[in-house]
Image (spheres, helix red, strand yellow):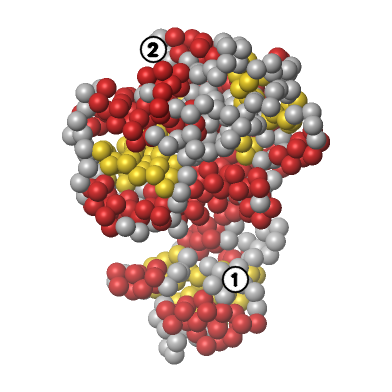
Amino acid sequence: MQTKSIKILWVDDEMDLLKPYIIFLEKKGYDVATATNGSDAIDLVKNNAYDIIFLDENMPGFSGLETLTRIKEINNIIPVVMITKSEEESIMDEAIGSRMADYLIKPVKPNQILLSIKKNVENKELVTKKTTSAYQMEFSKLGMQINDSFSISDWKEVYRKLVFWEMELSNSDDKAMDDVILFQKNEANQAFNRFVKKNYLDWLKTEKEERPILSPDLFRKKIFPLLDKKMKVFVLLIDNLRYDQWRAISPLMCENYSIASDDMYFSILPTATMYARNSIFAGLMPADIKKIHPNCWDDDDNEEGGKNNFEEELLTKQLIRNGRKEKLYFEKMTTAKQGLKSNESISQIIHSDLSVMVINSIDMISHARTEMNMIKELAGNEAAYRALSANWFQHSGLKELLKELSNNNVEVIVTTDHGTIKVNNAVKVIGEKSTNSNLRYKLGRNLNYNPKEVFEIRKPEDARLPSPNLSSSYIFAMNQDFFVYPNNLNYFANFYKNSFQHGGISMEEMIIPVIQLHPR
């Protein structure tokens, strides 16, 4: 029996023949009203609230399709199930185009009706129960997997599973599970931080088999092999795109593409645009960029922005260094629409061997959320943040671009330079005025901090990072921590709490998507 009575309206001019169905549904606990024509059905919908409507397609007076249109004008939320004797494709197309919820061919069986109700009305509750139960069963297994993760592939798999369950649970109505998945993510990040602290510097010494693909390896490992196969490649680098955000936008991206490879790579530290993105395009670690291409590197300081002005030049130098002669097209924009309005841009991409488009929109949303109360409300939690990202993509113009590229057989790589994490714990740091302003990492002299609360690199050369002064060192925030100075500590701790930040160590910041899309 139903915990809440579900109200059904059944519209059919041969209602007498349907009495066994009505009795069947009432015994199941459903409240069923009936109408024998479209006009009466429309009046009933005007004056009553129904959870679902079963509608005969062939009736005298208003046809089923006409009635459907009138019902949607009154209430476009009610799911309407069309029942018909006809299997003509044109009728099916018209019904689907009129936004019906389901389509059944006479004679229908009682269980078909029951299934349609469960699918269209009770699905949310059923999905919630099933999802919650499945995650509860998976919780212990995932906990053991977190504790047993000792390799790059282990951590990619753990993070992939956590993202899956977080997104599944966010689609359910059981909000009590939100705290559970958050707890398990925090537990995983604590273990991941220990893993990075133990292994990161070794990864930079040599290209061992167990080393992950890092920022400077991205083009050589993921893009050059496609060019070797004579594919036209379009690299879409969306700044600050987390793996869960990729999962949120992937259905939109895959309307004209299939996923050939859904992989992740590791951002270098600091997980900040200045370091990670320059490293991607140069194919070099930051210290090597400064050494080999000094004119293309601006030292980190208190000033924000302006430290990624040479990306095209760095990529060109990387291509030359690797003996590549592909025709390159490079475009960088604040918003997708900025460049997609131009047919010339699309033509350039199609007629180039390698095209790169850098888009900063997601990163701008992240920063705007910190500074603007309205964006904070729109992206109040992780699920809302993902939804805002998907909404941006939906209206960005990229869908049309990808459609055009698919028609021209262009392979697409979707990737990013780093991710972001929602921070909530202020950690006190004391530094000189020249110390950089990033909340997830600090670079400076005479830094004063609790070593147990950070990942410290006293010798920047060990991490292949530039050092403005001989005594400069780096520290990185872990878990959900962020750095604040003692001055006005409470104000800044409250201001930045629950904001999205990047630069430090977490799965969200470091384990980031590199996706290959193949034209359909």
Q: In the image, what residue occupies the spot 69% across and 18% down?
A: 447
Q: Say if 195 sits above or below 371 in the image.
A: above
Separation (CA) of disc 1 from disc 2: 65 Å
Q: Residues within 10 Å of mark 1 (few under 14, many from 20)?
A: many
Given residues 161 and 261, the one toward you in this image is 261
> In this rendering, would 188 be left or right of 254?
right
Q: In the image, what residue occupies the spot 45% across and 13% down?
A: 204
| Residue 207 tag number | 2
Quarter residue 3 falls in: bottom right
Q: Say if 353 sits above or below 281 in the image.
A: below
Q: In the image, what residue occupies the spot 71% across and 22% down?
A: 431
Residue type, numbered disc 2: Glu
| Residue 438 can be seen in this image | no
Q: Earlier in the sequence, mark 1 or mark 2?
A: 1
The N terminus: image quadrant: bottom right
Residue 423: percent from the left, percent from the top? 67, 35
Q: Residue furthest bottom?
A: 61
Residue 111: percent from the left, percent from the top? 50, 59
